[in-house]
Image: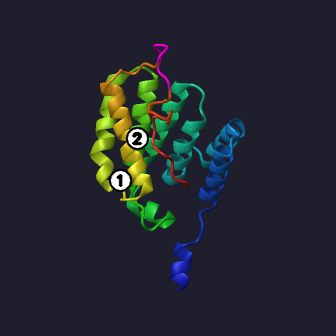
Amino acid sequence: MAEQQEQAAPDAMMTRIGQVVMLHHGGDREEARGRFLDLWAEIGEDGDPLHRCTLAHYMADTQDDPSDELAWDLRALSAAEELGDGRVAEHHQSLAVRAFYPSLHLNLAADYVKLGRSEAARSHLRRARGAVGALGDDSYGDGVRAAIGRLELRLDGDGTSGESGSPDRFGGPGGETLGPPRQRP
């Protein structure tokens, strides 16, 4: 019993990241960005890869410039590549690193669409599609699969341009963002 409680002990940094995610979802994007930067400085470039992956994944959503968003999503992917299933399971027993990849690659594909780089977007979209088998049969998995489908349609249809001829962040018929839904940490 004590061993189970020890495994279930909360990770303080993941809790703090989750609090900033809630702040961002509540509409305070700039405050969230500032707090994420503070946490990033605390974690450090060589800190726990789970913390870096999670924080960078959410930090990307707070960026105004698509190039900055891409840089954060690349940091998230790089940190995920350092992760092992054991470390992820410490945070949540049902998680596996491979389940991160559909979302991470989809985010990168969406970033490249925004930057008008359709071939790079297609490359990451193929990787996202190839990794969807790791997703659960739940609302999150369904959302990621749907976002992949929307982005595929967009790339096969009108390319990367919105009405103004420049990339935009909306791809779905209801104005959904190009990337996947984000799970809470």
Residue indicated by mark 2: 147
Between the residue at mark 1 and the residue at mark 2, the CA separation in whole angstroms equals 18 Å
Could you tell me the amino acid type at mark 1? Answer: Arg
Q: Secondary structure at mark 2?
A: helix
Point 39% across, 53% down: residue: 141
Residue 86 on the magenta segment: no
- Residue segment shown in magenta: 163-168
Colour mode of the rendering: rainbow
- Pick whichever, 96 or 126, lies toward us: 126
Give whichever of discs 1 and 2 has the lower sequence position: 1
Q: Is residue 180 visible?
A: yes
Q: Is residue 185 left or right of residue 110?
A: right
- Is 86 placed above or below 173 here? below
Q: Secondary structure at mark 1?
A: helix
Point 52% across, 73% down: residue: 7
Q: Is residue 147 left or right of residue 51?
A: left
Q: Are marks 1 and 2 in contact (CB under 8 Å)?
A: no
Point 67% across, 38% down: residue: 29
Residue 137 location, quadrant? bottom left
Residue 2 screen position, x and y as percent: 55, 84
Residue 112 screen position, x and y as percent: 42, 27
**Dominant secondary structure of the residues highlighted in magenta in the image:** loop
Q: Is residue 81 visible?
A: no
Can you tell which of label 1 and label 2 is closer to the viewer? 2
Could you tell me the amino acid type at mark 2? Answer: Ala
- Pick whichever, 49 or 184, lies toward us: 184
Mark 1 crowd level (few <14, some 14–19, many ≥20, 10 Å Cα):
some
Q: Is residue 108 left or right of residue 41?
A: left
Residue indicated by mark 1: 98
Quadrant of the snapshot with the C terminus:
bottom right
